[in-house]
Amino acid sequence: MPSGPNATLSTQPVTEPRLRLKPAAPVTGHVDGAWWPRTRDLATELPALLTALATRLGRIDRITYHLGDWPDPPRRITVDDSVVRLEGFRSQPSRSLTVIGWDRHRMTLLVVPPEASSDLAQHALATAADPGNTHDSAQLLAAPGTATERAQADSGSPLRA
């Protein structure tokens, strides 16, 4: 696989993305859904994700991510003969990824760490995809039954970060 700042990836991964999205509706909360990649290799993981998101966003122009979340991603990848720019920012919330279409419509996804337990990941995927969800990444990745989640349930509203 090519590496470096301008890598091109043209083969599709065999696996489907582990992805849950809120229904198409006006934006609510911090995220539009959640994604649970299998590895921390962004160039390998993105093609299947972008194929799935293209049904909602159309052609994908770029991806933004937190610099500390992905080791050495390329600056662009090629998916289905289209070049997608990858842009890392320290200002982007950690554990999130924003996918931007050519028409500038965007989706921000919670990124569940690949090493997360299946129970935690499934809980985060389901909660992030709930239409009424307004939780941030830390709240969404709090294990079910933790003090963070119990306080949130007791108050009836999301905790302030």
Image (cartoon, rainbow, N blue to C red):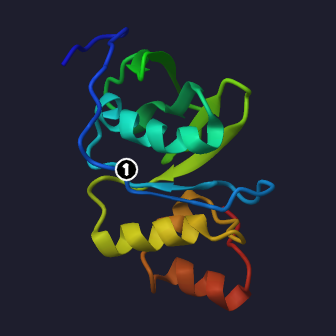
Q: Is residue 97 above or below residue 7?
A: below
Determine which quarter of the picture holds residue 144.
Answer: bottom left
Q: Note whether 59 is above or below 27 in the view shown.
A: above
Hey, what amino acid is under mark 1? Pro
At mark 1, the secondary structure is loop
**Image quarter of the C terminus:** bottom right
Q: Is residue 68 visible?
A: yes
Circle 1 residues within 10 Å: few <14, some 14–19, many ≥20? many
Give the residue displayed 63% in from the left and 87% down from the top. 153
User: Which one is in front, 101 or 118?
Assistant: 101
Q: Is residue 93 above or below residue 143?
A: above
The one nearer the camera, 159 or 14, is 14
Instruction: Describe residue 67's horizontal placement relative to residue 58 as left or right.
Output: left
Who's the residue at 36% across and 53% down the image? 113
Q: Position of residue 44 (x, y in %)?
A: 29, 32
Which corner quadrant of the image does residue 71 belong to? top left
Tell me the residue that label 1 is attached to.
Answer: 17
Q: Position of residue 38 (x, y in %)?
A: 27, 49
Residue 97 showing in the rendered view: no
Query: How many circles with numbers are drawn on the protein?
Result: 1
What is the x, y in percent for residue 48? Answer: 37, 40
Residue 149, image x and y in percent? 54, 80
| Viewer-nearest residue: 133 or 69 | 133
Q: The N terminus is located in which quarter? A: top left
Report whether 135 appears left or right of 7.
right
Furthest-left residue in this view: 1
Residue projecting furthest to the right = 26
What's the residue at 43%, 16% (across, down)?
81
